[in-house]
Structures are given as C-alpha cells and as structure tokens.
Image (tube, helix red, strand yellow):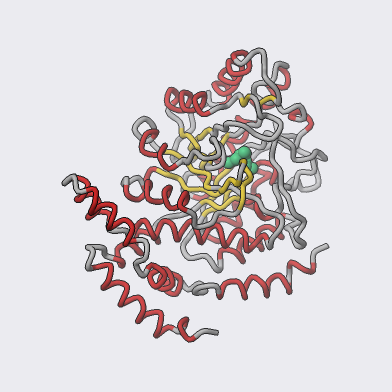
Amino acid sequence: MLMATSTKHIEQAYRLAKDRYAQLGVNTDQALQALARISISVHCWQGDDVGGFENAGQALGAGLAVTGNYPGKARTPQDLRRDFEKALSVIPGRHRFNLHACYAEMDGRKVERDQLGAEQFRNWIAWAKSLQIGLDFNPTYFAHPKAADGLTLAHPDPDIRRFWVEHGIRCREIGAAIGRALGQSCLTNLWIPDGVKDTPADRKGPRARLLESLDAVFKKKIDRKHNVDTVEPKLFGIGSESYVVGSHEFYLGYAVSRNILLTLDAGHYHPTEGIADKISSVLLYLPEIALHVSRGVRWDSDHVVTLTDDLQAIAQEIVWGGHLGRVRIGLDYFDASINRVAAWVIGTRNMAKALLLALVAPIARLKQFEAEGDFTARLALMEDAKVLPFGAVWDYHCHRSEVPVGDAWLAEVKRYEREVLSQRH
Ligand code: RNT
Ligand code: ZN
C-alpha cells in the first residue's frame, strides 16, 4: 500500500490543494458539501445484464445488446441487492437504485405486466428503506412476447396497445407506492423500443398512436411528491436504424405540452452529438429533467461511464448553470465483460468525480472574463484549471466519506468476487 494514502498525507495534500484553489476564488470545503448532497440514481440492470427475474422466456431484444460473459452475475433479487450493497460500500455519498418492472418478485406465481402492483416490489421497498436510499422505476417494454416485433405503445393492434398502456399505468402506480413508502419521489422513466429497421412508408401513423397511448398512460394525476413522470427519446437502435417512433422532437414536444420530464440519454443521439448542450435549453421549458448518463462507443453501446470530456461537459452544464436541483442524474450502461460490481463502482465514482471537478472549477472567474469580453483569459484559465490538484480533493472526499481512497476499492471488490461472486454457477 502506498504511503500517500495514509490519513496524514491525504489531509496534508488536501490542505495544499485547498490553498491552491482558494487563490482562484474557489472554496473546496463548500464544493464538497455540495457534492455530498447529490444523489446519483444507479441502474439495477448493470448487475445482471438487464435480465430481471420475471422469466418471460423471451430474449432481450428491443435493440438492447449486452455483450460479455464474465462470471458471477446476480441470479436472484437477493444476489442483486447484496451486490449493490457491496458497490455502495465503496462509493462516496448516498445514492439511489433504479429498478425496472421486470425485476418484480413473483413469489412463485406468474403476474403479467398488465397486472403488476406494488406487492411485487414489497421486498425492494423494504430493502431500500433499511438502507435509507431512494428508488426510481421503469416500465419494461421489451423482453416480452407482446414486444417481439419491436412495437408496443405504437403497435397497430389495439389489443397490444391496450396491454402496454395498462402496463404503463400500473408502473406509475408502483412508482407512487414506492415514493409514498420511502418519503421521497420516485422517478418513473418511460422508454419504448418502437421503431423499424428499414425506411417506413408511414411515419405519422405510429407517432399518432404513440401520442394517444401516452395520454392514456398519463391520464391519472399523481402527486409529484410520490411519483414523477419522464419520457426518454432515442434516435436509432439496433433493428430500428431507419425510424424510431419516440424521437427527440416527439418527446420534447410531449414533455413540454404535458409538463412532464424529459430524459436525455447520452447514447441516444447522433454519434458526435452530446447531451450537455441540450440541458440549458430544455430547462427553459421544463420544470426538471432526467439524465441517463452513458457512454456510446460508435453506437448507443452503453459502455461503463468514464471520465471523458463528454461527461465533464454534462457535469459542468448542471453545476455551472445552477441546475443541480432540477436535474435527476441517473446512469444507464451494461457491460457483461468485466466484474459487474466494479462496473457500477467505476461508473458511479466517475459521475461523482465529474461533478466535483465542475464544483471546484473557477467558474466565477471564467464568467467574469466572459462578461468583460476577455476570451483570451477565459481560454487560458479554462486550460490551466484542468491541471489543478483535483486528485487531492477527491481523495479527501473519499476519505471523509469513509470509503476506500484511490484504487483501494478494487481490492474490496476482488475479495467479494473471490468469496461471493465466484461461488455462483
Ligand atoms: C434504451 C434506453 C433505456 C434502457 C433501459 C434498460 O436505449 O436507454 O433507458 O437502457 O431501460
Ligand atoms: Zn437510457
């Protein structure tokens, strides 16, 4: 173990870093306080390759592709809860867990998606309560025989549409039950795969049907204290390369006109199009937004979130724009080629790092230069700020949050792999 990770060195390094940042008018203590208040909604589906526990006997489909066969994935809700607790134990801060409807617990009896209720999530709610964490929720519009042709809420068959409308209604009610039980609102995110592989002859019909289906799903008013609704657009997917019914324009219009939230997924736009620049625009029209922070590599591949420029741009927009209270930050990726607990930890710690980087940036000074028209000074400081002693502030944050500093968390996760994950077959 390196001596640099001893308490004395961590504190010394922090004091030096704090002085360095103070010269630029940045208060790192305040930045750390702000960071501690941010909860990241961590997606359950990294833990078991978007498998769920419903046994619908249907391939994932819907353009969702999980590659890799690293051993030790969660096979049961108990496994998944235990794995996530392990991940939480090495991530600084208090975070949330984001469930999908296909993670329902059936107690030996098959409950169809249009019949689901809070009962099937009783154990999840009790668990979240015991950990004092919040839960978010998603209807599952894939991995089901009634979604096998890639259409759900926009399906031409009214019976299939009715089935999925009922699923959406049930899921909002489950969200409300979760929010009521936990005393904090549950974000229920609606994403559907609907789209087609090749050039459609009719682009209008499916969108008109989706609009009607959504209005039926969202008809019942639910107290926002308990459940908050959001819709997630996408540009294209595997098998829906030519047309996706729920596009960005479709859902932006929908969210604004219905006063619900919009989810911006980092992998759902043109490969070089970031979501950071969208935040300040959509927040002029919407009360809040949600994010699915992901990392697309060439396509919407949902790689583990790393500390890229894209990620930093997202965090900067949230923090520098003063939007922290209006952006529900969630993660969305699934990698089955590495240890899944580590995948959670790496992505979530990176999201937190990006937020801290934005919080300790000399933004007041940058904005001042900009206001004075001194773009030379703005660029110069932006670039020099990139090599400020951020690592010392992050280490101190981990240390104070009583989680491993630096890469020491990996030893913990490796031990868990030896003792728990490798015993699963
Ligand atoms: C798919 C969407 C959606 C899913 C999850 C599993 O492209 O990003 O959010 O990843 O619902
Ligand atoms: Zn997503």
Q: Going by the picture, which residue comes out furthest to the front?
A: 376
Please count the marks in the image: 0
Question: Taking 22 as reference, is 249 left or right?
Answer: right
At horizontal 45% and vertical 83% (from top left) the residue drawn is 4
Q: Nearer the viewer, residue 74 or 21?
A: 21
Quarter of the picture containing the C terminus is: bottom right
Q: Nearer the viewer, residue 80 or 330?
A: 330
Q: How far across and how far down the image is residue 124, in percent?
A: 63, 52
Question: Taking 236 as reference, is 283 left or right?
Answer: left
Judge whether 90 appears above or below 254 on screen: below
Judge whether 148 appears above or below 317 on screen: above
Is residue 51 visible in the rendered structure shown here? yes
Quarter of the picture containing the N terminus is: bottom right
Is residue 123 visible in the rendered structure shown here? no
Question: Taking 194 as reference, is 257 left or right?
Answer: left
Q: Nearer the viewer, residue 134 or 176?
A: 134
Q: Going by the picture, which residue comes out furthest to the left?
A: 372
Q: Nearer the viewer, residue 135 or 305?
A: 305
Q: How far across and how far down the image is residue 299, in percent?
A: 62, 41
Q: Quadrant of ligand 2?
A: top right
Q: How far across and how far down the image is residue 196, in percent?
A: 69, 24
At horizontal 48% and vertical 86% (from top left) the residue drawn is 3
At horizontal 67% and vertical 13% (from top left) the residue drawn is 201
Occupied quadrant, residue 365: bottom left
At horizontal 81% and vertical 47% (from top left) the residue drawn is 108
Judge whether 135 appears above or below 212 on screen: below
Q: How far across and how far down the image is residue 301, in percent?
A: 64, 45
Question: Taking 335 as reference, is 285 left or right?
Answer: left
Judge whether 93 appears above or below 173 on screen: below
